[in-house]
Amino acid sequence: MDIIRVEGGHALAGSVCVSGAKNSALKLMAATLLAPGVTTLQNVPNISDVHVMGKVLKRMGATIEVADEHSLVIDTSNVDSWEAPYELVAKMRASTAVMGPLLGRFGRAKIAMPGGCNLGARKIDMHILGLEALGVKFDTDHGYIHADASEGLIGANVTLEFASVGATENLIMAAVRARGTTVIDNAAREPEIVDLANMLNSMGAKIVGAGTPVVQIEGVKELHPTTHRVIGDRIEAGTFIVAGALAAGEDGIEVRGFNSNHLGMVIKKFELMGIDIEHIEGGVRVRRAERILPVDIQTLPFPGFPTDMQAQAMVLSALADGSSVITENIFENRFMFASELVRMGADIRIESHHAMIHGVKGFSGAQVVSPDLRGGAALVVAGLVADGYTEVSAIHHIDRGYEHFVKKLEDLGACVQRATIPDPTDE
Ligand code: EPU
């Protein structure tokens, strides 16, 4: 089994450049289905979730050429299937992002029902309600959702019950090809949605208001291929900021390749925790905090504190001088990471969707299991300042979203390596 082994206590220095945003790239890849022809995506992260989305598109008849490590040339001219099969959706829920584009292009989609995941039940009822308002008829059998809009999509007003990222994206990608105008109220405002709307507009769509709670989409007859550069990954950036705040040497570290406005609330909260973050061209410089102050954080849709930074923030607060509270409002099951951090000496009590964290003096290296993508990365970061060795297993979770994570940490001066070890539970 593969693990990441970290020896704590090595100071970080230098600069790290984050990759393109996973949660943008996946949706932009899906959006290429809307424009028959060759679309080029640049700054695409080389991560396993992107590989899975590549398989989804290929299964439908697209061809993908990897022009360089970070540029994908996707030809959707010969796409002739509208099915996202179970084995791929089960690997990656974000495969459901093809539903909107398939409805937009073919008026139909057959998508395996995603089921729950390690963050909770994760329903897609809001996607379905919104698409129904656009005239889509849904049916389910044998674990598949059949969506039919063969008579055409019709623009409508849709108010989302919650500002869901995935529902907003699927609705936008269907509405760009609807007859008439669609207005999405209480839309998600994440930077990845703005990135998607920018790409669709460069393909000929007419979307205004992306990044605000009201997005208006005037349907068009066709979309054409384009070339688009994926925005930098704000969550990867935030993860390295936490690494710097804990382990940087005297000069701090630079985290580049992203727009620091996309981390507004994270930077604000970290500054309240006493972390020195300086804005520089193309990113930030972060210095090690001599004393971390306790904090009260609630995860919320953008521009609130992102749930995808919750575990990393918990690592910081676990070493604070005092008691912190972190409230998870987005996912029902995103505290699994806490019990692993407790194995490293943290003092955390979970009550429903609140975590009460009493700061301790330090972590002690241990064998821990990556519970999910962000939790896994956060455990590696905790290992940077732990006493002795930390071994993080189940690192396929980390590979889903962090490109060359070990190499980037190594380049900053961390003592970290990937290793293959025998599974200790095997006889
Ligand atoms: N929800 C419903 N019904 C729906 C849609 C969502 O109940 O129809 C619930 C979900 O179960 C969840 C909450 O609403 O509890 C938020 O879900 P949302 O739709 O906003 O999230 P998502 O689109 O499924 C994306 C990211 C997540 C990120 C969230 C929130 C991708 C591929 N995933 O998920 O990223 O945490 O938005 O910002 O874009 C990650 O990268 O580690 C990750 C989990």
Image: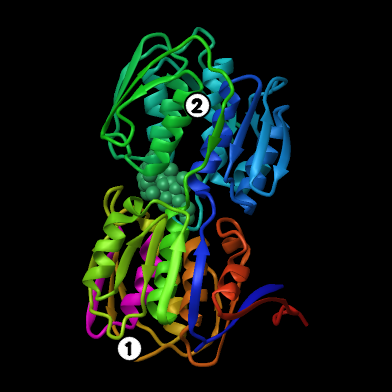
Crowding at label 1, few (<14), some or many (≥20) Cα neighbours within 10 Å?
Answer: some
> For the residue with label 2, is its CB less than 8 Å from the closest atom of ligand 1?
no
Queried whether the magenta region covers residue 330, the answer comes back as: no
State the residue at coordinates (29%, 84%). Answer: 359
Image location of residue 139, percent across then percent down? 52, 24
Residue that protrudes farthest toward the front in the picture: 281
Q: What colouring style does the render use?
A: rainbow
> The residue under label 1 is which amino acid type?
Val
Above or below, 409 against 234 in this view is below
Would you say 51 lies left or right of 21 here? right
Image location of residue 1, percent across then percent down? 71, 73
Q: Earlier in the sequence, mark 1 or mark 2?
A: 2
Above or below, 396 against 107 in this view is below
Residue that protrudes farthest toward the right in the picture: 427
Judge by depth and name the residue closer to the eye, 348 or 405: 405
Determine which residue is flagged by label 2: 100
Judge by depth and name the residue closer to the eye, 282 or 45: 282
- Mark 1, secondary structure of its residue: loop
In three-dimensional space, the C-alpha distance between marks 1 and 2, rounded to whole angstroms, equals 47 Å
Above or below, 288 against 311 in this view is below
Q: Which mark is residue 360?
A: 1
Q: Which residues are magenta?
A: 309-328
Q: Is residue 142 at least partly visible in the picture?
A: no
Would you say 79 lies left or right of 248 here? right
Q: Is there CB contact under 8 Å for labels 1 and 2?
A: no
> The residue under label 2 is which amino acid type?
Gly
Crowding at label 2, few (<14), some or many (≥20) Cα neighbours within 10 Å?
Answer: many
